[in-house]
Amino acid sequence: MNEQDLLARLNVSSLVDILLVALVFLGLFYLVRGTRAVILLRGILLVAFFAVLASTLLNLTAFNWLIRNSIPALLVAIPVIFQPELRRAFERLGRPRALIGTRTTDATTKFLATLSRAAGALSRQMCGALIVIEGRTGLQEYVDTGIKIDAEISVDLLLTIFNKHTNLHDGAVILRDERIQTASCMLPLSENPDVDRDLGTRHRAALGITESTDAIAIVVSEETGGISVAHNGRLIRNLDEGNLNRLLTNLYTGRPPDSPMRRLFAPLRGASNSKPLARKN
């Protein structure tokens, strides 16, 4: 089939078909960007490239047979390998705020401001803390591991919970509906092998809970007082109280990344590697 035949068969339906396939691959790359799944995806694409090469150009019968019979196993393995990314994608599609827009109220503004002030106070007092804001993905299985509080959020209450001399300072505080639901909760640790080895248990737990859910985790280092935020399996470090408030507003309200937020994220990315955190935090 020459180029003229290909052009003759090209119509609107074919263009839409090509566009949809391109969008699927674009979405897949966007989904796994910045995660360990990128390496696995490269391997799969490399195998697919050799499979096409073997079947069309080189006529490698044995290799072509091997690839053809491996496809059923790959169809089972791919959903297992990419389970966190696929789960996150379907959760994003199912989140109402993705369809109805942002959520900003006076109560939400006050909630985020109080949370930022509490993180700043914990940082100044060098109190280690892990605070998780529940998103659309329920965290009941982790809530059940903690001590129920169900109280309105306040700076003094969070300072008391994370005081080194209280029994609640270990573990995480989980916030639900802008209230403190439970304290001293156990969270899963990140299994990402690329996580900085200098990160301690709190930071690994923050990454772990955000790798499989849409939660937002705030971490205060006990050793350095540094404030970090984890979201979607990524960690932004070395925040001050003002940057924390703006970042939480962006993430929590679902505000689109307009140019002021892009200006905010630029220095944060540069600061994320400027000062490593101590292991014990």
Image (cartoon, helix red, strand yellow):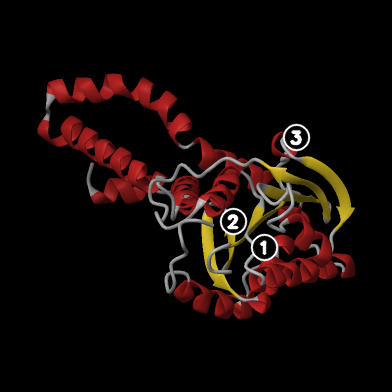
Identify the mark at residue 231; answer none if there is no mark.
Answer: 2
Kindly identify the amino acid type of the residue bearing the numbered disc 2. His
The numbered mark, 1 or 2, whose residue comes first in the sequence reads 2
Q: Which residue is mark 3?
A: 144
Calculate the distance from the C-alpha at mark 3 to the C-alpha at mark 2: 22 Å
Please say if the residues under marks 1 and 2 sit with CB atoms less than 8 Å apart.
yes
Q: How far from the left and from the top, in percent, is residue 76?
A: 43, 24
Q: Where is 80 relative to 28, above or below?
A: above
Q: Which residue is mark 1?
A: 251
Kindly identify the amino acid type of the residue bearing the numbered disc 3. Asp
Please say if the residues under marks 3 and 1 sit with CB atoms less than 8 Å apart.
no
Tell me the quarter of the image containing the C terminus. bottom right
Please tell me whether mark 1 sits on a helix, a strand or a loop: helix
Image quadrant where residue 65 sits: top left
Of labels 3 and 1, the one closer to you = 3
Calculate the distance from the C-alpha at mark 3 to the C-alpha at mark 1: 25 Å
Observer able to see residue 104: no
Q: How many numbered discs sit on the rendered protein?
A: 3
The numbered mark, 3 or 2, whose residue comes first in the sequence reads 3
Q: How far from the left and from the top, in percent, is residue 99?
A: 74, 54
- Write the residue at 73% across / 48% down: 168
Q: How far from the left and from the top, in percent, is residue 54?
A: 16, 32
Q: Nearer the viewer, residue 251 or 220?
A: 220
